[in-house]
Each structure stands twice: as C-alpha cells, then as structure tokens.
C-alpha cells in the first residue's frame, strides 16, 4: 500500500472510533472545589454516589454578588445524593443580589432519580418591607420538558419562612437543574438586611429492591434451620457432656 493511501486509511480508522470523554472524578477527592472548579471541568464533571454532575454554568448580576470562585461546593451523601453550595449571599441598604447555577445530572438505570429537594438557610436579620431572600429550583429533562413545579424557598422576616421544598416524579436518568438565588433589601434607616449562605440540591434514587432481600434471605434460612433441628438430640448431647462415665 502506498504511504498516502496508508495515511488515509489510518485517519479513517481513527475517525470511526468512539470519542471517549475524560472520566468524572469524585467531588470529595477535590481540594476545596468551587463553582469555578466545576465550570472548568465541562462535560466530564464530578460524581457523588451513583450520580454524575456536569456542564456547570454560573451567572451573577452585580459586582457585589459572590463570584464563581467564591461559591464552595460540597457533596451531600445522606437522605439521597446531591450538592451543597456555600457562599455569602446578602443584601442591605437597597442592594440586590441574584445568582443562577445550572448543571446536568445523570445516573445509571439501576439508580434512577425519583425526586428532588431544595434547601436554603435564608434569614432576615433586619426585616423591612420589600426585603426578602428567595431560591427557586427548576427541573427539566434533556428535551427541556419541565418535570416538576418550580420549587421555592422564601423568607421575608414577616411571613413564616419556607426553608425547604421537594417533589417526586417518574424515575429519570438525566436531568437539567437551574437554581435561581435572589436576595433583596430596601434602603432606609436602618433598612432591610437579607442573607443566605447555604443552598442544597438533593436527589432521591429509586429504592433498591435487593437491599432488604439480602438481609432477609439468610436470616430466614438460619431460622428455618434452627426450627428443623431436633431438640432431643441437642438435649442428649448436653447430657452426654455433663454426666461422668460410670
């Protein structure tokens, strides 16, 4: 085969090979990861439990908002898996903060996601009319179909605060998540002050049907074995050991 023809054949062969993306890494293995870290990881993303989180974006609206480098990201591994975003969101003297976090989550068919939860520790240290802290979470499929109502947490210092919300849906393996965080205050003396420092997104997997089975089957087998064992032979064994030979 001529060199040029050989080169063309190799190029065609390589082009036909499947493209392999860089594998996701454990979020817990990263040192002090931030939103900037995750945005830079692109489609490879990070894993928490059986879920992979990837294609992160972060947007803010003012110079006073936390930047992507100032938003810490931590894994959640209890009552589901998920992400915790930690930053200093606050507004006073008539200021407003607004941040948006978007990402995708995928999981294996054996651990499909059946629900999503939202938590915020929003607080209003100085209540005033028009001062509030709100976080909303929207869940969509990869085809942009909404899967749940928009979940919202809210605090204004007057009404009863709503710090958590959740919703269940038909099992899914792929989701698109958007968190919208808005902190607003009113000007005046002293004016309003609103804060939030923790936002959590939690994903609930479908229950494992084998989890209880692995515990029950051996227990039942042992129980049945004990019930079938003749009590008389056990008593004779004990007597044989206890009584001396004559």
Image (cartoon, rainbow, N blue to C red):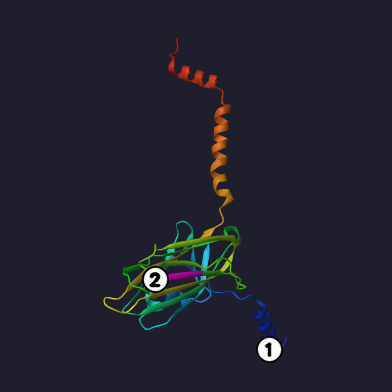
The reply to whether the magenta stretch includes residue 244 is no
Do callouts 1 and 2 mark residues in contact (Cβ within 8 Å)?
A: no
Residue 122 at x, y = what percent? 37, 67
Quarter of the view holding residue 72: bottom left
Quarter of the view holding residue 192: bottom left
Q: Is residue 158 left or right of residue 116?
A: left
Mainly helix, strand or loop, the magenta region? strand
Q: Is residue 177 left or right of residue 76?
A: right
Q: Is residue 188 left or right of residue 178?
A: left
Residue 3: give its label. 1
- The residue tagged 2 is 133
For the image, the number of numbered tags is: 2
Label 2's element?
Answer: strand
Residue drawn at point x = 55 percent, y = 33 percent: 223
In depth, the one of 94 and 114 nearer the eye is 94
Looking at the rendering, in which quadrant would you find the N terminus? bottom right
Q: Nearer the viewer, mark 1 or mark 2?
A: 2
In depth, the one of 101 and 109 nearer the eye is 101
Q: Is residue 92 above or below residue 83?
A: below
Looking at the rendering, in which quadrant would you find the C terminus? top left
Classify mark 1: residues with Cα within 10 Å, few (<14), some (14-19) or many (20+): few
Magenta region: 133-137
Residue drawn at point x = 30 percent, y = 76 percent: 191
Residue 47 at x, y = what percent? 49, 66
Farthest residue toward the left?
A: 189
Residue 178 at x, y = what percent? 50, 72
Q: Report whether residue 111 is seen.
A: yes
Q: Earlier in the sequence, mark 1 or mark 2?
A: 1
Residue 24 at x, y = what percent? 51, 70
């Amino acid at each position: 085969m001529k060199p040029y023809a050989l080169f063309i054949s190799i190029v065609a062969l390589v082009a036909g090979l499947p493209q392999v993306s860089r594998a996701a890494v454990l979020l817990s293995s990263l040192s002090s990861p931030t939103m900037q870290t995750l945005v830079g990881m692109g489609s490879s993303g990070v894993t928490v439990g059986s879920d992979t989180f990837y294609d992160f974006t972060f947007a803010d609206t003012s110079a006073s908002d936390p930047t992507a480098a100032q938003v810490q990201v931590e894994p959640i591994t209890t009552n589901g898996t998920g992400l915790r975003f930690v930053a200093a969101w606050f507004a006073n003297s008539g200021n407003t903060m607004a941040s948006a976090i978007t990402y995708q989550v995928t999981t294996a068919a054996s651990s499909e996601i059946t629900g999503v939860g939202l938590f915020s520790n929003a607080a209003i240290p100085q209540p005033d009319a028009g001062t509030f802290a709100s976080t909303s979470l929207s869940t969509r499929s990869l085809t942009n179909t909404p899967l749940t109502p928009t979940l919202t947490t809210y605090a204004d210092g007057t009404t009863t605060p709503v710090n958590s919300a959740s919703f269940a849906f038909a099992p899914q393996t792929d989701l698109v998540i958007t968190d919208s965080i808005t902190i607003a205050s009113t000007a005046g003396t002293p004016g309003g002050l609103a804060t939030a420092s923790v936002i959590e997104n939690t994903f609930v997997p479908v229950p494992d049907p084998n989890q209880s089975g692995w515990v029950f089957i051996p227990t039942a087998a042992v129980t049945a074995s004990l019930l079938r064992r003749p009590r008389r032979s056990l008593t004779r064994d004990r007597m044989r050991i206890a009584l001396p030979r004559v």
